[in-house]
Amino acid sequence: MRRADRLFQIVQYLRGGRLTTARMLADRLEVSERTIYRDIADLIGSGVPIDGEAGVGYLMRDGYDLPPLMFTHKEITALVAGARLIKAWGGAEMAAAAEEALVKINAVLPDRDRVHAEAVPVHSVSSPELSDAVREKIDRIEAACDTRLRLSLDYADAEGSETTRIIRPLGLWFWGKVWTIVGWCELREDFRMFRLDRIRDMAEGERFKEERGKRLVDFYAQMERECGV
């Protein structure tokens, strides 16, 4: 384990506010107690608010956090590629957040890792089918899933037949070019999946509480039964 990674792990172990001894840290990180004493001294010297002493134990005062930005090259590749995909195919707010996340990641990475991040060879180009209206729906549905707001959908199926549904939104799925929403349909009293590009109109409604049999975990269980997994 790199020393930088070990220092990060020490901070994470101390975050709980409980007294932690050097022996406990040494056992978890597979190093000597002497190494832990040196690491603790260096962390304190760099401004990390750790209280305690050798032979007694250590704890960290509340309010301090160390951002987990010690990424491997593969992790950097995955983060950059994922952010680029969201910029190309996500909602408007998602895309803006992804771009801002890339800026923040690059700002704190070491020079060598920053060069690697900028050279990640994975890119994505949006489709004209992903209109501004669809991007707005993505953001609104994501927010409704997060805050558990019912959605009223004016929906047209593949044949063009229109229906109005009240659903409890559970999640968004991206299929390469098409976004779908999975929800509990209060008309059919079952799970249903709707394509976002076929939603003609949409309005937020009242909040709902999770009920057994109508949750995302229940949707997954139903899919497993139907697929014989």
Image (cartoon, grey):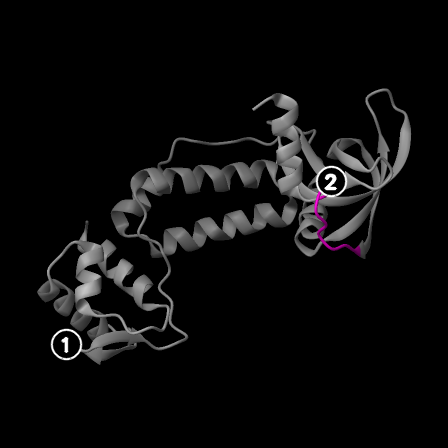
Give the main secondary structure, helix, strand or loop, of the magenta stretch. Answer: loop
Image coordinates for residue 110, horizontal then vertical, percent: 28, 52
Would you say residue 210 sits in the magenta stretch? yes
* 147 in relation to 222, above or below: below
Mark 2 surroundings within 10 Å by alpha-carbon count, few (fewer than 14), some (14 through 19), many (20 or more): many
Mark 2: secondary structure:
strand
What's the residue type where badge 2 is placed?
Answer: Gly
* 46 in relation to 8, above or below: below
Q: Is residue 78 left or right of residue 5?
A: right
Q: Which residues are magenta?
A: 207-214
Question: Quick one: quadrant of the C terminus?
Answer: top right
Residue to which mark 1 is pinned: 55
Quadrant of res 154: top right
Residue at image x 58%, y 45%? Answer: 95
Q: Is residue 36 left or right of residue 13?
A: left
Q: Nearer the viewer, residue 84 or 188?
A: 188
Residue to which mark 2 is pinned: 183
Give the distance between the C-alpha atoms of the residues marked 1 and 2, in whole angstroms. Answer: 56 Å
Report if the CB atoms under discs 1 and 2 are less than 8 Å apart.
no
Would you say residue 80 sits in the magenta stretch? no
Residue at image x 13%, y 56%? Answer: 31
Residue at image x 50%, y 53%? Answer: 100
